[in-house]
Image (cartoon, coloured by chain):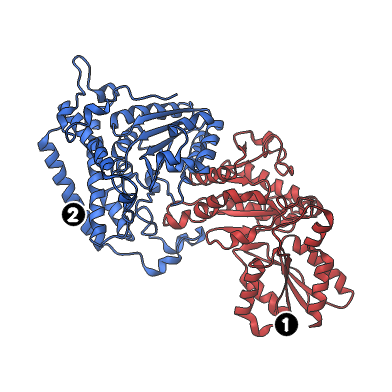
Chain colours: A blue, B red
Amino acid sequence: MMEQARHRRPEAQWRGSGGEVHEFHEVHPGEPPRHRALGLDDAQAVEMYRYMLLARLLDERMWLLNRAGKIPFVVSCQGQEAAQAGAGLALDRQHDYLLPYYRDLCLVLLWGHTPRDELLAAFAKAADPNSGGRQMPCHFSDRKLRIFSGSSPVGTQIPHAVGFALAAKMRGEASVSFVSFGEGTSNQGDFHEALNFAGVHKLPVVFFCENNKYAISVPEHKQLACANVADRAAGYGFEGVTVDGTDALAVYQVVKRAVDKARHGGGPTLVEAKVYRLVPHSSDDDDRSYRPREEVEEARRGDPLVRMRAYLTEVGLWDEAAEVDLRQRIASELDEATAFAEQAPYPPEESLYWYVYGEEETSHAG
Amino acid sequence: MPVKLYIDAVREALWEEMERDSRVLILGEDVGVRGGVFRVTAGLFERFGEARVIDTPLAESAIVGVAVGASAAGLIPVAEIQFADFILPAVNQIISEAAKLRYRSNNDWHCPLVVRAPYGGGVHGALYHSQCLEALFTHVPGLKVVAPATPHDAKGMLKAAIRDPDPVLFFEHKKLYRSVRGEVPEGDYTVPLGQAQTVREGEDVTVITYGMGVHWALAAADQVAAEGIRVHILDLRSLRPLDEQAVVAAARRTGKVLIVHEDHKFCGFGAELAALICEQALFDLDAPIQRLAGPEVPAMPFCPPLERAYLLNADRVAEAMRRLARF
């Protein structure tokens, strides 16, 4: 039932002395680079990394803004970027439905949101495409991009994804719905009810668990009595797969297979990407009270960004100059987006009463 | 005009809406092959097939949660909760999700779904096949909550609910299914949500009620008419949106208001009605507003004497009318 990605490196090989790039050995004589073997061209492999870095730097910018007292709340994607980039590239961003959870910053950037969009949300401004400043940051939504709105009670989006898949199947569309969540959420009734429904009706949905080892403070072993979240799929009659979520290409491979299967009538898959949450649960959390610093430092040595950069460097698609250039361009994009979002207007006070019901649609158009 | 059972009117609405609009689908427990435990959906599976009349796993949160997703994706799901008592596992999906989707997405997404639920007691259903849970939901902006009392309204309001752009909770009193017949027009019609209806004109006492209460009140009004008490009855039909104008007008009509519902009294829907009347028509009242409602016990017991003691009936409503008329 479970499958480790074929090219996964043993940890010792890539968690070396500070995560230096030369520790990685991804190229084997006579074989194509891993990404090409998986059907990704060079530009796509680089795209993965660009979005991972964009998400990381945007996330870090939001922490800075929070600590500077400019935005009230941050909830982070750090440590989960490779899982999201790998999954995002495996989907059809023109047709598939995305039902993300609050850590999927990299995924929604890949899906078409910009740093400006997410900073507008962070500053809770009217032009925030997710909610017009109504929801907390990282409650992603955008109908034109087929990103479905979520709430804060966890797991409610999982049956929604099954509903999207049901609609696709009924209409004979080839679209797949992709829904993500953490391992803590896999204890919610909605997770189990939704997987069962999708299994019974063999619907085109991919359930994507980003297992970052902690549900705020409660570690995995107090959340799960089984070894893997993916093991739970067996109870619902479909395949569960675990994958190293710090390896974007491995995640791509596994999710691509799940998406292709769903698109061709093979039903759902539960993919569990093993990651690590590198920062506290949110800007209001202090993780020093529940996990040792050594553990976090150890995880940082396996930072998925370091790993992806090493791979691209080794296959000749990246170098120091490209890194410096990309970081500079992202920094100026973030500066510009921050200034824009900070100065953007809030929604008008009277909008409090807008959009409770549909009949009011015409009265506030534009 | 043909006379039909309440249950047949509900089925006709589903049938006609599914004929009219291929986006409409039904999902719930036993709604397909079995045609529903009450037989509301009988024949729909045979006519529209298993893709549109879906027997779901026994899991209410998934029934509503899948309906939320499917409706956001462009379908119009009519989810059946087999008994209103079993809606509680789906409350998070109804209140956190369906009710707030339009608002939280700044009008970008919405979910036009209907949740049908048979409610109410008097059928030996005991604690968990008898409850009235409407007040839990009328508190929630973003939801619409209706409880039609007649076959005419059941059909017309279910069609309106299916065509409505927002989530509608459609409460059908299960005792009405086969005990009440009424005229149902041929062909397509809707009864708009949010409009109350005066079902009896009178000058002495106003009864404001809905669901089974309408039938108790009509029978009670006949009883007291012989004693010279002329009763005015307003059937709310829709609880949210509430026809506030009609409520206030009905209160002003007699100055003596009796609110009747099967659901518990404390924080029940009657409390909202009483508050509304006080806010808008206090000085038109000639007596304190009276509420006749279910007792403050958790739910309805199974044994016949306790079930009888729990439930209102026409005699008890008539007695309340007399007391108020004498005031």
From the top left corner, tell me how far across and down residue B28 is, in percent: 63, 41
Q: Is residue A128 above or below residue A87?
A: below
What chain does badge 2 belong to?
A
Q: Does dot 1 land on a helix, a strand or a loop?
A: loop
What residue is disc 1 on? B287
Q: Is residue A315 above or below residue B170?
A: above
What residue is disc 2 on? A335
Quarter assignment of residue A52:
top left
Residue B219 seen from this side: no
Image point (82%, 59%), residue name = B308
In the depicted view, which residue is nearer to us: A284 or B155?
Answer: A284
In the depicted view, which residue is nearer to us: B238 or B326?
Answer: B326
Quarter assignment of residue B298:
bottom right
For residue B128, side relative to residue A248 (left or right): right
Q: Does dot 2 land on a helix, a strand or a loop?
A: helix
The kind of residue on which mark 1 rests is: Ala
In the depicted view, which residue is nearer to us: B280 or A83?
Answer: A83
